[in-house]
Image (tube, helix red, strand yellow):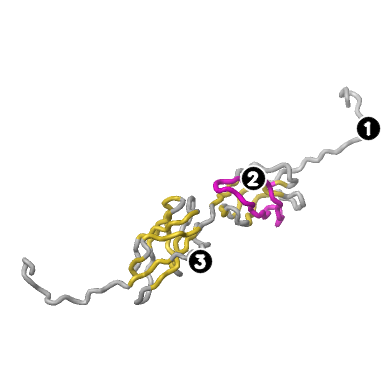
Amino acid sequence: SSNRVHFAAGALWFEYEQLPVVMRIKPSMSTSGRGDVVTVIGASLVAGESLRCSFGSVGTVAGRWRSSSHMECTVPSLPSGNMTVEASNDGRHFTTSGALLVCAADVSVASVEPSFGPQHGAQLVTVHGRGFAGAPNAACRFGSEAARATVADQNRLVCYSPSVRGNREQGAAVEVSRDGAVFTSQSGVSYVYEEGGSLVGVHPSSGPTLGG
C-alpha cells in the first residue's frame, strides 16, 4: 500500500528464521595455522551449504553439520591471541556468543639449561623455545617420562627432571606440551642423566681435631 488504506491483492511472504546458538567450542585452543578442527556446540544449527563459522575479523569457513547442536569447522591460519568463534546458518547472520579460541604460536624446543643432571631427578631445568605463553597444562617430557611445567614466559618453561632407572649415563630427548597431552617431536634437544657417585666408607674413620 502507498497510502495505508488500499492494499494490493497479491501477497509476498517474509519468513523469520531462528538464529543458531553457540554455547561453547571444543577445543578452545589451537596452534596458529595448523588446521585444527573445532567443534561448535550449541543449538538450532541447520544443515546446508550456507552453514559457516567465523573467526574474528579474519574471515569465515564452511561448516560441517553433525547435528542440530554440533558442527565442525577447520581453523584457518590465524595470528596469535584470542579469537571469537561464531556460527551462521545462512552465511550472513552470525551469532554473537563471544566464544573464545586461544591461538598459540607453533611450539618448539631450542635448548635446555642445565643440559645434564643426576639420575634420581629433581633437577630444576629451564627449557628454552617458543609458543609457551598461556599454556594451561604445560609439561616437559624427558624420554618417556613427563613432568609438569611452569610457564616463565612465552619462550621459557621451568620443570623438574624426573628420575630414571639404570646405572649408566644416558641422553633423554626433551619435548614439551601446552596441554599435557600432545608433545612436540624430534626436537633434537637432549638432557643427559649422569650416574652419581656413592659413598662406601672412609679410612681412617677418625683423626685429630686440627686436621693434618
Q: Position of residue 148 (x, y in %)?
A: 43, 60
Disc 1 to disc 3, C-alpha distance: 75 Å
Residue 72 shows which numbered tag? none
Disc 2 to disc 1, C-alpha distance: 47 Å
User: Mark 1 and 3 residues: CB-CB less than 8 Å, in contact?
Assistant: no
Q: Is residue 12 left or right of residue 108?
A: right
In this figure, which residue is indicated by the disc labeled 3? 186
Disc 3 to disc 2, C-alpha distance: 32 Å
Q: Which image quarter holds the N terminus?
A: top right
In this figure, which residue is indicated by the disc labeled 1? 9
Q: N-terminal of the two: label 1 or label 3?
A: 1
Query: What amino acid is found at the position of numbered circle 3 in the picture?
Result: Gln
Would residue 82 be counted in the magenta stretch? yes
Q: N-terminal of the two: label 2 or label 1?
A: 1
In this figure, which residue is indicated by the disc labeled 2? 58
- In the displayed structure, would residue 52 be above or below residue 147? above
Q: N-terminal of the two: label 3 or label 2?
A: 2
Q: Which residues are magenta?
A: 59-87
Rendered image quadrant of residue 160: bottom left
Q: Main secondary structure of the magenta part?
A: strand
As rendered, which of 190 and 45 lies closer to the eye? 190
- In the displayed structure, would residue 165 be above or below residue 12? below
What residue is drawn where x is 49% and y is 64%? Answer: 187
What residue is drawn where x is 8% and y is 69%? Answer: 212
Q: Residues within 10 Å of mark 1 (few under 14, many from 20)?
A: few
